[in-house]
Image: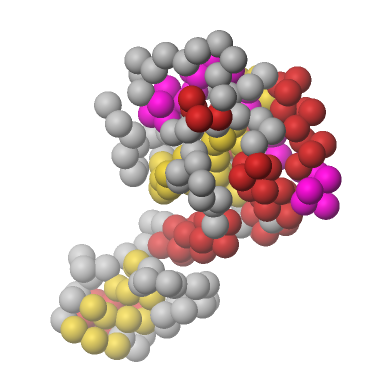
Amino acid sequence: MALRINDVAPNFTADTTEGNIDFHDWIGDGYAVLFSHPKDFTPVCTTEFAAAANLSEAFARRNTKVIGISVDPVAEHLKWKADVESYGKADMTFPIIADDGLDIAKLYDMLPAEAYLPDGRTANDTATVRTTFIIGPDKKIRLMLIYPMSVGRNFDEILRALDAIQATDGKDLAAPADWRKGDDMIVALSVSTADARHRFGEVEEVFPYLRKIKAPA
């Protein structure tokens, strides 16, 4: 069955460039970004890993761990890591999971369960392994993004979405289109306007179903 928003992210153990991990234990009590790649030493993925490496402090400020996954063994990841750091001019401080058996790719529906991949497979054989997950402290999936081979991920959007998820988690609020931290927020439909004014102060009622408030401090 396909994974959906608010499903518990499947747990797994795996070898990584920083040793063996239990995924849920590794996440701990914060958020996590899991982003997958079809193969090491591929051009778009190299730029993506470099972008993530340059945002290590931004993710840390958001109490968020980053972990990559690629369908090659750890030894290949470590060789590729040098290229990523050379290209990005930044240390890659997050681990890369080895998924050369495609167990995690199948567990997370990145590939069909019955997929057969030939020996000597290329990135084209694993093209669907281009998924990004944001996972909450409760280990539930908050966001899924799937990219084609030819389109590099927008890490600014990943950070923006992470901010919105954290700003609305467990609150009766939503983030409008193009929301950025500090922008006005939307009151959930489950909250009456009168209750919203009691809880949040001033409420701008654009429509009866679209009410805005200043972002809580």
Residue 27 visible here: yes
Residue 17 visible here: no
Seen at 45% across and 44% down, the residue is 148
Whether residue 161 is situated above or below residue 194 in the rendered picture: above
Whether residue 71 is situated above or below residue 204 in the rendered picture: above
Provide the residue span drawn in magenta.
Answer: 85-111
Seen at 41% across and 62% down, the residue is 168
Residue 28, how many percent across, how many down? 59, 37
Seen at 32% across and 81% down, the residue is 212
Frontmost residue, 214 versus 112: 112
Residue 99 is one of the magenta-drawn residues: yes
Q: Quadrant of residue 199?
A: bottom left
Frontmost residue, 194 versus 148: 148
Residue 206, how many percent across, how many down? 24, 86
Name the quadrant of the N terminus. Answer: top left
| Left or right of 12, for residue 202 | left
Frontmost residue, 68 versus 66: 68
Seen at 45% across and 45% down, the residue is 147
Whether residue 20 is situated above or below residue 84 in the rendered picture: above
Residue 60 is one of the magenta-drawn residues: no
